[in-house]
Image: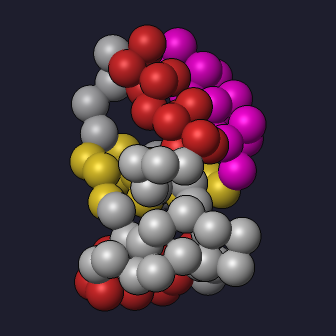
Amino acid sequence: MLELYQAEQCPHSTEVREKLTELGVSYVIHNPRLPGDEGGDVLNEWAHQAMTDLGGEDSIPFLVDTDRGEQRYESDEIVNYLEEHYG
C-alpha cells in the first residue's frame, strides 16, 4: 500500500498526485499540515506524528510504500521511484 503525506496547496504534492493518477496507482492520502518552508500549521496531529515517526522529518510530500518497505521525500525522488516500480 502506498501512503502519501501531503498538502493540497503544495505544488510538489500536486506533482506526486498527478504521477500517481497517471500511473493508475491506488494510494491513501494524509494531510498532516499546511505547506510551508518552516512547516505550516498542523491540521491532523495523528498524521503529523506518524509522518515524523516514520521518516524523521517534518517535510512534505512524503511517500511510504508499505509493501516494499520504502520511504521517500522530495517530489522528484518520489516520482522517479513511482516510475521505476509502478510505471
Q: Which of 12 and 1 is in front in this view?
A: 12
Q: Which of 15 and 73 is in front in this view?
A: 15
Membership of 86 in magenta stretch:
yes
The answer to whether 48 appears left or right of 72 in the picture is left
Residue 78 in which image quadrant: top right
Residue drawn at point x = 26 percent, y = 30 percent: 26
Please tell me whether the stretch drawn in magenta is mainly helix, strand or loop: helix
Compared with 81, 67 (above or below) is below
Compared with 61, 45 (above or below) is below
Membership of 38 in magenta stretch:
no
The answer to whether 59 appears left or right of 1 in the picture is right
Colour mode?
A: secondary structure
Compared with 48, 2 (above or below) is above
The answer, for residue 66, to whether it is visible in the render is no
The answer to whether 28 appears left or right of 36 in the picture is left
Residue drawn at point x = 57 percent, y = 31 percent: 15
Q: Position of residue 66 (x, y in %)?
A: 38, 54
Q: Where is residue 21 in the image (x, y as percent from the top left)?
A: 37, 20
Q: Where is residue 74 in the image (x, y as percent from the top left)?
A: 70, 50
Please state the extent of the stretch shown in magenta in the rendering: 74-87
The answer, for residue 44, to whether it is visible in the render is yes
